[in-house]
Image (cartoon, rainbow, N blue to C red):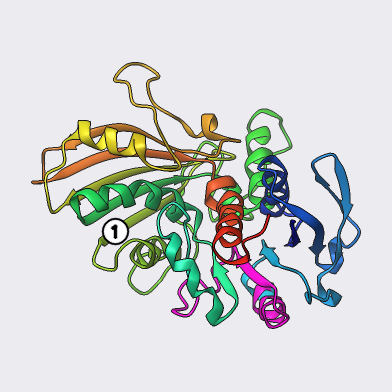
Amino acid sequence: MGYRIVVVGATGNVGREMLNILDEREFPIDEIAVLASRRSLGTEVAFGEKTLKTGDLDTFDFTGWDLALFAVGSEATKKYAPRAAKAGCVVIDNSSLYRYDPMVPLIVPEVNPDAIMGYDQKNIIANPNCSTAQMVVALKPLHDRATIKRVVVSTYQSVSGGGKDAMDELWMQTKGMYVPGQERVPGVFTKQIAFNVIPHIDVFMDSGDTKEEWKMVAETKKIVDPKIKVTATCVRVPVFVGHSEAINIEFEDFLDEDEVRDILREAPGIMVIDKREDGGYMTPIESVGEYATYISRIRQDVTVENGINLWCVSDNLRKGAALNAVQIAELFGRRVLKKG
């Protein structure tokens, strides 16, 4: 027996990736509906060997459907997610709207699976920010062993985190460097992204942090441990897909770099690629299309008493969004619906 599943925002980058992953992982589905806004109504999307036509989100009746995977912005989610939840369809939301709501569980299945049982307060489960998701997968098993005091993270985030228009802007600006007359001024980004890096993702806050940096702090505390101190600098880089992070971790107890490798090799969702030789590490382009979060460059930080440095890479459209949402659906099926 399978599920009745709805994918909301099925024509976007993340929505299409959700459909790919549902098919790849052979998620047990009896019936699936793909929805989009009216401007994309009737657009065809692929689901395995099938081609599905998008329906109208505005008129869709969620009654009798098990799960709705939302991959639309916060404004649309604010309007339609409560409607789905009220109809008895549990929402797994990829936007930032519900992540900081104390009545909505924020889930990374490898990290805090038990928290999913809090879904029944609103019938909504939140998916974390892409940069947070891959980091906490690495932090949790280390925190369990030696208790993390502080994390300093610098991110190198691909343009796909900004959607299709952001990817198009990088492509067109890159082409414009070589084709006279095709130069493109910044539109999605505040400055040129091609052959450049931009230390600015989301809006600036009064503290001087950007909203993206604040998200990493707040979400890590909610998912892993509110006592962990986190500071982040989030940077957009001219990469199409795949987020990278340089993470410095300070522990309460000493943790040897060899033990860190052993712990992470055994941790769910992680692959350690860490050889001290040319090419003995992962880069974002190698993570594209993969499920794992990759860890490289593990080494002691001798500038603090109990410090470790590591490099973390993942496909942000997968673990950072679509894959995590599907893993939440799988977890929910095992823990709550118990079918499939």
- Residue lying at the far top of the rendered structure: 278
Whether residue 79 appears in magenta in the rendering, the answer is yes
Expressed as whole percent of the image width and height from the top left, the position of residue 67 reads: 69, 66
Left/right placement of residue 31 relative to residue 13 reads right
Residue at left 55%, top 78%? 120
Secondary element under disc 1, as helix, strand or loop, is strand
Magenta segment boundaries in residue numbering: 77-104
Question: Is residue 206 placed above or below 237 in the rendered structure?
Answer: below
The residue under label 1 is: 231
Name which residue type carries label 1.
Thr
Whether residue 165 appears in magenta in the rendering, the answer is no
Expressed as whole percent of the image width and height from the top left, the position of residue 29 reads: 76, 54
Looking at the picture, tell me which residue is in the foreground, 301 or 294. 294
Expressed as whole percent of the image width and height from the top left, the position of residue 220 reads: 36, 61
Residue at left 31%, top 48%? 141
Classed neighbour count for the residue bearing mark 1: other residues with Cα under 10 Å, few (<14), some (14–19), many (≥20): some
